[in-house]
Image: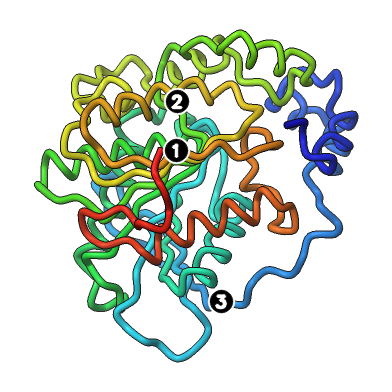
Amino acid sequence: MPLHPSISARLSLIEGLPSWQEALADPAMQLRMQEYRTWKAAPALPTVRSGDESVPGPHGPIPVRIYRPPHAPEPPRPALVWVHGGGWIFGDLDMHEADWTSREVCARADAVVVSVDYRLAVDGVTYPVPHDDVVAAVRWVRDNAAALEIDPSRITVGGASAGANLAAGAVLRLRDDDTWLPAGLVLAYAAMHSVLPPLSPPQAEAFAPLPRMVRLLPEDVATMTGNYLGGTPDPHGYALPAGAALDGLCPTLLLDAEYDDLRASSEAFAAALVKSGVPVRHVTVPGVLHGFLNLPASLEPVDHTLDALAGTVAGAHMGQLDPDQGER
């Protein structure tokens, strides 16, 4: 289907801008960027309780934000450990993809959500530092389930874009090191390859008119993953899960944007999961671009995606895929 009209109408604001990094560094371009990213008609966010904490990690304390439903606790609740995106070089607990998504899932799933502020791959930081942070945060949630009033058999791990990469890598590491898996894994518009698989001809034709600013071309992916790795070997595929052994992984929900170059990475990863016998649900969200979880729930495809994400968290039980969520 065509781009959602609310998204299409905004593309003129970023037409001709060179790249996110250059635009954010240029004050003259920042106003256009600010307008593009501001949704004046965004609805009020769900009312939930939230608080910031630090959890221990091998590279120092890791900030997390914990979201709890507003009503009287009815423990134990399901939980989601959520990891924001940003190409491993930007993003924080306040970005919409982190905060808005966490609040929506907390309210819709009646779940505890723990959003992770991992160290970014900047100023000399490279893999495995961000990966280690996410592994440590998931372990902390698992090991403190009673204090968090969550059911340890109903923990889901998920993330978006680079955060989806980190979520998958963390689950693979915990499978291997701890012989433990969460109840489920949720990967939104995931980056799983260092070399981006090619788009299908129809996809390439549909994406060609899009502004350069919303494209993630193979050279962009190579630059981002190269910066993240920093020359560090990845023998187990924890940094780039497309190269990992996927056998025995937990049930996985993949959420792709229809107009996103990273669809090729996510689709190839979904096929590899199926080949390895992993229960998979793979959804392509119509009419949206990469990063659509930064948009308000008033957009129908975002609202439906949040329902799917929350339904997966609420229905997750160890080793099971929610039967109401369908299959790939």
3D distance between C-alphas at marks 1 and 3: 29 Å
**Label 2 element class:** helix
Residue 119 showing in the rendered view:
no
User: Residue 249 occupies which quadrant of the picture?
Assistant: top left
Residue 313: where, in percent of width, then height? 40, 61
Q: Is residue 296 left or right of residue 227?
A: right
User: Which x, y percent locates residue 60?
Assistant: 31, 50
Badge 2 vs badge 1, beta-carbon distance below 8 Å: yes
Instruction: Choose the circle earlier in sequence order: 2 or 1.
Output: 2
Q: Which residue is mark 1?
A: 282
- Residue 295 in percent (x, y) is at 70, 49
Label 2 belongs to which residue?
A: 267
- The type of residue carrying mark 1 is His
Q: Which color mode does the image show? A: rainbow
| Disc marking residue 48 | 3
Residue at 32 percent of width and 61 percent of height: 316
What is the crowding at mark 1: few (fewer than 14 residues within 10 Å), some, or many (at least 20)?
some
Q: Earlier in the sequence, mark 1 or mark 3?
A: 3
At x 14%, y 51%, the residue is 180
Spatial separation of the CA atoms under disc 3 and disc 2: 34 Å
Helix, strand or loop at mark 3: loop
> Tag 2 or tag 3, which sits nearer the N-term?
3
Kind of residue at disc 2: Glu
Residue at image position (70%, 27%) is: 20
Residue extending farthest to the bottom is: 72
38 above or below 48? above
Q: Confirm or deny contact between disc 1 and disc 3 (CB under 8 A).
A: no
- Locate the C terminus by quadrant: top left
Seen in the image, is 27 located left or right of residue 191? right
Residue density around tag 2, few if under 14, some if 14–19, many if 20 or more, within 10 Å:
many
Which of discs 1 and 3 lies nearer the camera? The answer is 1
Give the answer, above or below, for where 265 lies relative to 66. Answer: above
